[in-house]
Image (tube, grey):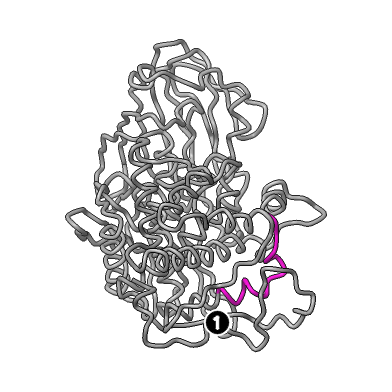
Amino acid sequence: MLLLVSILLGFLSACSQEDSVVGLSRRELSDLDLKLDFSRVTKNGEPRLQVQVSFMMPRAQMGLSLPDTFMRKEALYQRIENLEVLSGGSVGNGKDNSIKILQAPVGQRVSYRYLIRSYQENADKNDSFSAPIIWDDYFQFVGSMGLVMPLAFRTNEELNLKVQWDMPSGHQVYNSFGAQESSQSIQASGMALMDAVFIGGSTIRAQQYTVRGRPVTIALQGTWDKISDRDFADVLTRLLEKQRETWGDDNFPHFLVSITALGDGCTPNKPVKYVGTAHVNSFRAYFPGACDFKPDMKQLISHELMHMWIGKKIKVGALRGHIDGKWFTEGFTDYYGRILAYRAGVLSEADYFSTLNRQVEKYSISDERQVRLAELVDRMYRKRISRPTNSELEMVPYQQGEVLAWRLNKRIKVETKGSSSLDDVIHDLLSMAASAGGAKNFSIDEIAKSVNRFAPGIFMAEYDKINNGGFFNPPKLEDCAQPTSSNYLDFSTENKQYSNKKPLAYRTIKSGCSKWLQ
């Protein structure tokens, strides 16, 4: 559902402020001797996570970035308390609440510490998905939610850091870099550190698995009435196996899955609230405790796992937050999340089409279905008061991207007489990303060139609909399914008579679907 693409949002504007060291050299980064120490403390009888950061100062002044925005949650710096320099320097205020100024002599070790607190008293616990959880027996946060770090460390260059966990007896600790290690030596970029998941506590149920020769930790917190730990493990390992096999990629030295029971949910005839995000070598989700293991929940897991490739390695979009490329990074991820869940045996053919139909139906009757790309970006990120964003608008890139992926897949299969598919385009893009160092932000022309290798000349006409607000009709899948409704019509042109909002969906499923789904 949700891709973590907003790590930079809270501090991009701050980069031009007081930070005089953006652009540290590799040597300066290698000489930092960065250390992070975590411990559990209490304040006024309430649990806190204490973080102590120390390193050798590369410059006399550095801008410290406090957590600010994560997804929908803003002002996360309010969760940071008692920030103080312990030795070697001083800290002062910056131009806004998310920036502090650290001063110390060059080459001297400086050390500062602070507390992370959980949601405010009487706040909805569900807001914790986008903010740190700090309970007596459990904690969870993403680096960008809880780490106060110099802006200059937020780089794609690797950092050498040591992490120490001083936890109460019986507490387990897991993160994107390892499992059950009280002392860690980590090589990771600053951006990977901010994208990492950190969890710990005394009530975690963790199991270790091996997928294609690589370790996977599944850490569960809380209980579900109708879903067993084995159910989660079966779905997750099947999906990991199939996705890694499909993309020929087992480069995951360690992988962490964190699933937390939060909220009741599953009230009849009401929306079920669950959410997930993908992170470096990790995935986390919140599922309500009273639910069955619904096909849409399995699709969410598959979607987020698929972000290890689309979103992490294949990036699209030049604007802040890559919102202009969300039709690809979310829409194509929905397509592959769903279809690889089917191939892995996690979704049946009936499940596949029922979950797909819900998206096609919502798309076909959405008031936002013909939004132009420039307007979508303007409303979602510039927050125009005259036409603000809404949930229908924000789902359009997911919906149009998945239907576009289906259209391209069909055309490629037809043009190549079944010898190629959209899978080959993704393999092509992943190869280019690997050649670029592991990840690449692709231009529209580069995507078009790759698609055109298999079905010449089809991509730009399709992409024009993204730009200009055209509607994507789902393709007819011969001998399998076709889009129908009681008032089916072509949405590629405006039709003022379509006022009853009768939904469009795949209604007829026959026996020849395998050639389209494999």
Given the image, on which type of amino acid does mark 1 rest? Answer: Thr
User: Visible in this render: residue 125?
Assistant: no
Q: Residue furthest right?
A: 386
In the rendered image, residue 119, in percent from the top left (x then y), is placed at: 56, 53
The magenta-colored residue range is 359-372
Mark 1: few/some/many CA within 10 Å (<14, 14-19, 20+): few
Instruction: Say which residue appears at 32% left-offset and 57% top-offset.
Output: 202
Q: Nearer the viewer, residue 3 or 378?
A: 378
**Where is residue 436, by image quadrant?**
top left
Q: Is residue 284 above or below residue 181?
A: below
Furthest-left residue in this view: 213
393 sits to left or right of 3: right
* Residue receiving disc 1: 267
In the rendered image, residue 362 lying in the magenta stretch gets the answer yes
Above or below 242: residue 431: above
Camera-side residue of 442 and 416: 416
Q: Is residue 218 magenta?
A: no
Given residues 464 and 291, the one toward you in this image is: 464
Q: Quadrant of residue 79?
A: top right
Give the residue displayed 48% in from the left and 81% down from the top. 354
- Is disc 1 placed on a helix, strand or loop? loop
Give the quarter of the image for residue 93: top right
Image quarter (top left, top right, bottom left or bottom right) of the C terminus: bottom left
Seen at 42% across and 77% down, the residue is 352
Residue 114 in picture, x, y percent from top left: 48, 35
The answer to whether one can see residue 205 in this image is yes
**Residue 228 position (above or below residue 378):** below
